[in-house]
Amino acid sequence: MEVDHEGLHLHGMELLRTATARYHNHALAVLHFTVTRPLLPVLRAIGRRPGAEAEPLAGPLAPDRLLGDTADVQTGNGTFALARPYTIAFLTPEAEHTPALRTDPRSHVELSADAWLWQLASRSTPADFPLAPEIAADEFRHIVRISSDWSALVLRHGAAFLGHRPDTGEGDFYEFGELHARSVYLDALLLGSLQRDHIDELTDELSEVFDDTRLARRVAALERNIARFRSTYWRQHLTAHGPANELLIAFQAQHRLPVRFAEILAEAADNSRLVQTQESQQISGALGVLTILGLPVGTALGILQVLGDESVTHLLVALALSVAVTAAGLSTRYGRLVLSSLRAGAGRDSSQ
């Protein structure tokens, strides 16, 4: 697909289907652009910063128009409904862009370059979001130095790649860097997005476990979904080595995915233990009822059999005495505890 509109050239689109347990047709759309006008104002407009330009993804570049009948653009406040598209910017400077350049290939990157990189990733200017000096060091600490030529930064709503030497044009290394940014590095961020969406869904499932009485069934379904996610998507390494892994780890850190998944595992394990405890109580209660009911009846019938008494009257008297003994047993503290455990279990699992 080729579309030109107000300084944005669309090279093509990718549609990545990312089915989950609840949303079988969920997908992510990736739009590949080259921007021929200043990049930061375009990013600010996509992020809908106050005073930004008009929406760039409009007219012929509107997502619902581009996708047509292929897919429906999701809106609203659902699990996967992002407020604005996630942006990945790649900017190579020219010779006059000194704030982004290294003074020497062996020198450290200037603070101005990291500040520019942060603005591209956050889709903001100092007027939009003045970064406090006390937290700037923490923000810049997550910058990935891919090589002396360029760096990357991953934030919650966007990522950016910034060159640190002038772009010499056609045939420059930056063509290779752009290819990586549009392929394997993009894959790392897409995998992080999949992990975030699945963890969001698992969190929703976990919060609904006690919404009805089918606790055992809900916990079993949750454990299956966790196992499926863990074996399919939960990876912290995309390649054997290299910056793609660092980008994935940076995305996970921005969304606290390892911590959130660990909390899901811990809470699911607690719920599983609760189900096992309830089932053990039910089994113990059933065995207790069998003991209270069966012992008097079995004893009475055994005595009659030993005595060889085949009188129906004596049999009925023995059964009546057994019922009386059983009733007396159920009125004791142990008997009441048995009945209470059975009633509680039946009340919790009446819909199973």
Image (cartoon, rainbow, N blue to C red):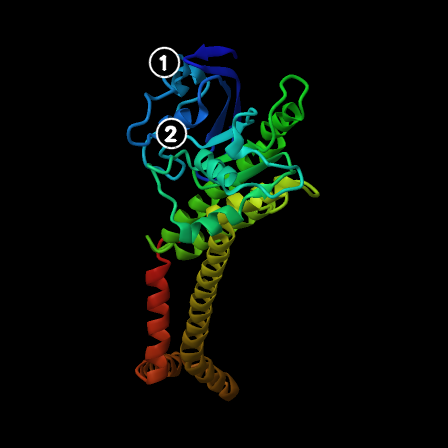
Where residue 230 appears, x then y in whole percent? 57, 48
Tell whether 179 sits left or right of 301.
Answer: right
Observer-nearest residue: 12 or 289? Answer: 12
Residue at numbered disc 2? 44
Where residue 67 appears, x then y in whole percent? 44, 18
Q: Secondary structure at mark 2?
A: helix
Going 41% across and 54% down the picture, which residue do you hit?
Answer: 134
Residue that extends furthest to the bottom in the rendered view of this protein: 307
Residue that extends furthest to the right in the rendered view of this protein: 240
Where residue 317 appears, x then y in whole percent? 35, 83
Going 46% across and 63% down the picture, which residue do you hit?
Answer: 270
Going 41% across and 73% down the picture, which residue do you hit?
Answer: 285
Tag 1 and tag 2, C-beta contact below 8 Å? no
Observer-nearest residue: 295 or 187? Answer: 187
Q: CA distance from mark 1 to mark 2?
A: 18 Å
Observer-nearest residue: 346 or 110? Answer: 110
What type is the residue that disc 2 sits on? Answer: Arg
Classed neighbour count for the residue bearing mark 1: other residues with Cα under 10 Å, few (<14), some (14–19), many (≥20) = few
Q: Secondary structure at mark 1?
A: helix
What type is the residue that disc 1 sits on? Answer: Gly
Going 38% across and 35% down the picture, which residue do you hit?
Answer: 125
Residue at numbered disc 1? 59
Observer-nearest residue: 292 or 255? Answer: 255
Disc tally is: 2
